[in-house]
Structures are given as structure tokens and as C-alpha cells.
Amino acid sequence: MKKGKKIISIIMAVVMIMLSVIVMSKTLFNNTSENDNEEDKNIQGREQGVNPVDDKIIPAIDGKEELGRYVKEYVKNNALALDKEINCLDEAYVEKTSSKSDSTGIVTGADTDYYKNNDQTDGVTEGDITITDGKYIYIYSDNKKNIRIIEADNDKLKEVGIIDILDNLEENMYTYNGKIYVCGDKLVCLFNAERMNSSYINGYENFIVNDCAYFDSCRDTIIVLYDISERDKPVFINKITVDNEYVQSRMVGNHLYVMTQKSFYDDLYGYMEEYGDNEEDKEKFEAVSYEELAGKVITKINGKEVPTDNIYCPDNEQSGEPSTCTVIALDINNDLNVTDNCTVIGSIDDVYVSEQFIYLFNRVSKTDDKSKSRTYKELTDVIKIKYGDGNVEPYAKGNIDGTVNNQFSADEYDGYLRVVTTEYEYNVIYEPSDIEEFQDKYRNNVYVLDDKLNIYGRIEGLAEDERIYSARFMKDKGYFVTFRNTDPLFVVDFSKPDKPKILSELKVTGFSSYLHMWNDNLLLGIGMEANESGITSGVKLSMFDISDLNNTKEIAKCVEEDTEAYEALNNYKEILVDENKNLIGLEMSKDVYSNGESSNGESSNYEEYIGYSQYYVLYRYENNSFTELLKYDYNKSNNLKFTEYDYEKMYCDYRGLYIGNYLYIITMDKGVQAINLSDLSYGDNLIFN
């Protein structure tokens, strides 16, 4: 798919301009004949808009014929491009209780105090694979295809229930990328699922009329609701199937908002392969109806197409992955009833959700062909969707230079969206050299967008030849880290949104992949230490003093030499950070060598690599210093030894959370260890069957 994305990104600009001509004359919310069954509880049209949409910004599709016409033009243009040699842009780059302090330095409190997970926006819950409600721990496993329910009573652990997520699915379904939510006595599980389809290999005729194309499987989003009022007897309530790929989701109150997408390229590649081969194939394609082509890109919820007046086409001058993005709202308290949905033509690379808006970031590209060179430039389309009380509706569309690193690159405050981006430009120079020369460069930008996503303020061209590794915002201040050889921490003042200002730039060794506001005066950074040449040497924790915004300082750091934290630094959900509890926890790993003994047990003059060791490390911070409290290794704690290169058994994936005064270290698919935070003594060690 990545290869397809690169190819399509170059030629989609022409197509999207054509689209804008088609749709700009249309009015919003046209009623269509296919919207005859709005009473269907699992797919509803729009009853009342959340906020009027400017149809000049995001016009609505006027029926299947218009959508099908666009798809047909898309296929023709891309079919011709498949036969051409196109130099594409490479991937530019690979997120209080009353208490007292005891001897461990950890804040302890009431038993009702528990970890709420690491969410970006207050009041907007993000799905995860391990969560707790203060009494039970819920653990989702992609590998085991189940959800375990563990009762945690201080140092006592008991598995009281288990949900097999395959029980209510079709046979031969492959599931992955799962997340769970708990809302009172309801549990929601979301995941991607693929089902095999032989339409492509059975020939062109079958290929035309089936929903899935090119690949041998279809990607669906499955959303399942369970009643867990009796934790030992979970009961299935309802299931929603969306024929799009699951991207992200958020829960606010009793409503769940799910972001999904479907790639045109996957569904239409066969048409593009056939079109252009000969006149017979062209005629066969021309005979395909607009309605049939429209059906390839219209989202289906429980097998029923969403109304076309819920589909919107932003006016794009550039374009990226040809996709539809569908946002679905569901009522958890009403058996997972689909209360609203909307589809926007475009892809999703990242999602940021504020208290009122969903922001979709779509990486796009722009090509500038000159007589002696060609320039590729990356940009980002931003789609703003208003949500609330089970409603979703497109609100505005904007465009900025560069691309976001992750969801923390954006933040909404006082009606403005602040975004930091890394801009990547790639030049191919044909002359005067007989051999093509390639030049690329990075720079970083800060943007402030108004309510309609117009650029209101900006700072551009920061830290050339570096890229953004992490960002965080706090009220009218922003912090972001770039890296190449050293780690500049930039502090930005947004108090005047039209004139954002860099207040300070602190250069330290290494970089921070995740930033977390410890308090009003301290900023925690977690990343990697590196030397002056940019070569990393181990996991690094940094504490920055931001009390004087014009003179930011690194006042403490802790480096675990020769370690990695790949999972944690690429998924902030794996990091436990709680400033009130004074806890910082994450998984690390280290390569293991034979210490001069070869694999056959004979003496050797060199150390032989035999695998790696993974463990969970817990820290506290006080008096300008990080203190390691414990290092938990599941394999060592259970006296498990493995033969060399037995990676599957050796591998451990750790998560940590707390309830009251107890820390629970979860070794995914293997077990849970209870630890008393008051004295760090070990309690129950629950081993999964």
C-alpha cells in the first residue's frame, strides 16, 4: 500500500482539481433516493446539523451518479499513470488525592485512586489494550484474541472472566489493532478484521462485482458491545461492522466516535490494471455503471450504504492517498446504536481530538516540474469535524506546509488550532549533470489556524536539516523537540495567536520522543541519549525547568546505557506517567551476549549475541533527580531460561498501571505481578493459562 500511496500522491492533484469543478456548484444536504430507510437504527442520515457547513469549503456529493463519475475519471487517470516511470517521494520518516510520602518517595493514597490512562485531552478517553476501573483490570490481546478480566484486591489477583472476541465473528477472520473501553457495566471492543475473498484470482468478471479487490482479503472495522455487570459472565449485546479500516476512536460520556478509512487504490487497482491494456478492456470498463463504481467507495455499516448526502468532498489543490474517511458516532447506552456518520474524501495519517472538534491530518504532496529539475514537497490537509451528543459533521478544511509527527503536534486553545510540522522537500536535478542529482532538506514550522482553519499566525523555517520528534502544549505555550545531532527544545509563546514567538531554544544531547507536563514549572522528556554525532547510547529521562520561559534548563537527566525503548517511544500509551503519584514507568530492552562463551558452550575469545532482555523500569522524581525504584523482568522473576535465539518465548511486552497503593505490571499474554508501592514488596503473581 505504501508503494501505491507514493505513486498516487503524484498524480492525484489533477484528479482532485477535476473533482472540485464537479462538486463546487452543488448545495449542501441534497436528499437522494437511496436514503429511503433513515429509520434503520444502525445507519441514520442527518436529522439536524451540529453546525452549518460552508459548502464552498466542504461541498456535499449530489448522489451516486456524481460520485461514480468522479471514480471513473480517477480510474482512467491512474490507469494511464501506471505505465509511466514516476520518481516518487520516499517516506520522509519512519506520541489528586489527600496523601503522604513514604520511604519510597511514591505518593500513596486512598484505594479508590487509580490510573486513568494517558489521554491527551481531559474528558476525551482514548481506547487502549490495558485499562482499569479501580477494581478490575481489563487486558485485550491481539495474539490470544481475548479480553481478560482480572479482579485486583491489593496484593491479591484473580482472573474472574474472559471474553473470546471470535465468538461472535464469521469463521476464518483475522483480527488485529484492537482497543477497549469500559463505560460503567459496558465494555466496548474495536478492532480490524480481514476475511478472505477469492474474487481477484477468479477473474475480471467476478472482480468487477465484488466489494473487495486486488488483495485476497477485506479490511473491516468491528465494534462489539458487552454487558459486564457480572464480570464472571460477560454477555454479548451487539456488533457493528464497517467495511473500512479502523484508524482511531474516542469516547466522550456515553458516546463513542470511531474514525475509519477506505483506500480507493485497494478497491480499484484491478480496474486500473485492466484499463489501457486493449480496447476491449476499455469498453468493458466504460460499460460499468456510475452506481457500481460509487459503491466501491461508499462506506457500508452493517452492510447498508451510508447516504450520499453524508459524503463530502473538500476542494483540494494537492492530494495524497485516495481514500474516504468515515467518522461514526455510536451510543453505548443504547446498545451501540449508530446515531450519526459522515464521510470525507481524503485519508487519515493522524488524528487529534479536542473537546468539541475532531481534526484529521492527511499527508499530501505537491510536484513542481521544471525543465531541468523536479521538486516534491509534502503538505498536510486538515479536516475539522464538529462532534458532540452523538452527532458528527464536517466544519472546515485547511492546508499547511509540512507534516505532523503525531497527535501531540496539534492542540486547540481559545478557539485556535496550533500545529507544528516538519517540511520535507525532495529535488531531482537532471541538468547540467548527465547523472541525476538528488537533494533533500528539512525545516520545521509553527502554525496558528483560526476557526475556519485559515492560517492566522506562523513561524517557518526553523531548525533546518532536523525534524520534530515530540511536541506538547500547555495553555498559551508550546514546546517541541527537533533532532539531528543534538536536541533543541523550543519554547513558543502563543499569547498573541497572530504573532507566535520563539522564546527560547535549549540544546542538549539526545532527544525526547515524548513530552509530558509534570507541573506548571516542569516538563518531562522521555527519549534517547546521543553523542554529538547523533549516535544513540541509551534511554534517557530529562526534566526541564520551564519556570523561566526565556531561559529553559535541563535540571535532571537519567540515562540507562545500552538500552532501547522502541515500543514505548513509538506508542506513548505504553508509558505510565503520573505526576501526582510520582510515578514514571516504561519497558526497556537490552541486547544479551554470551560473555565469552559460544553457542555450543565452548570458550571463545569474543562475545556472541544470543538475544535480548526486556524489563519494566519504575522511577520517581524528586529533588532534581530521577531514582530507579524497581526493575521487573518477567522471565527472571519466574526463573525462565531459553535457548539461544528463542525470541518468541523470550519476548515480553509490558504495561503498568496502579490501583490505590499497588502497582500492577502486566506482561501481555503471560501474567500480572502485584507490587506494594509503600515498600515495593511483591504480592500475587498471576500467570495466564
Image (tube, helix red, strand yellow):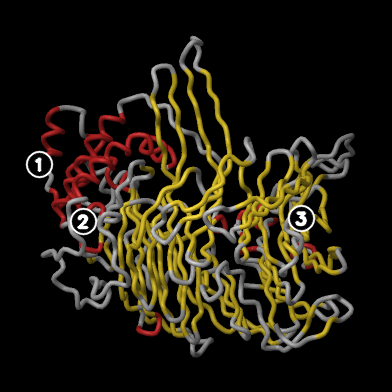
Q: CA distance from mark 1 to mark 3?
A: 66 Å
Q: Is residue 556 above or below residue 155?
A: above
Q: Tell whether 178 sits left or right of 332.
A: right
Q: Tell whether 685 sits left or right of 48.
A: right
The one nearer the camera, 570 or 223, is: 570
- Circle 1 SS class: loop
- Residue 55: horizontal and vertical position, in percent? 25, 58
Tag 2: amino acid: Ile
Instruction: Please tell me which of labels 1 and 3 falls first in the chain.
Output: 1
> In the rendered image, which residue does mark 3 sit on?
552
Q: Tell whether 79 sits left or right of 628.
A: left
Foreground: disc 3 or disc 2? 3
Q: CA distance from mark 2 to mark 1?
A: 22 Å
Tag 3: amino acid: Thr
Instruction: Please tell me which of labels 2 and 1 falls first in the chain.
Output: 2
- Residue 508: horizontal and vertical position, in percent? 78, 47
Residue depicted at x 12% and y 31%: 280
Residue 319 seen in the figure: yes
The one nearer the camera, 505 or 16, is: 505
Q: Residues within 10 Å of mark 2 (few under 14, many from 20)?
A: many
Q: Is residue 586 above or below residue 70?
A: below
Residue depicted at x 39% and y 75%: 388
Residue depicted at x 75% and y 86%: 109
> In the rendered image, which residue does mark 1 sit on?
287
> In the rendered image, which residue does mark 2 sit on?
61
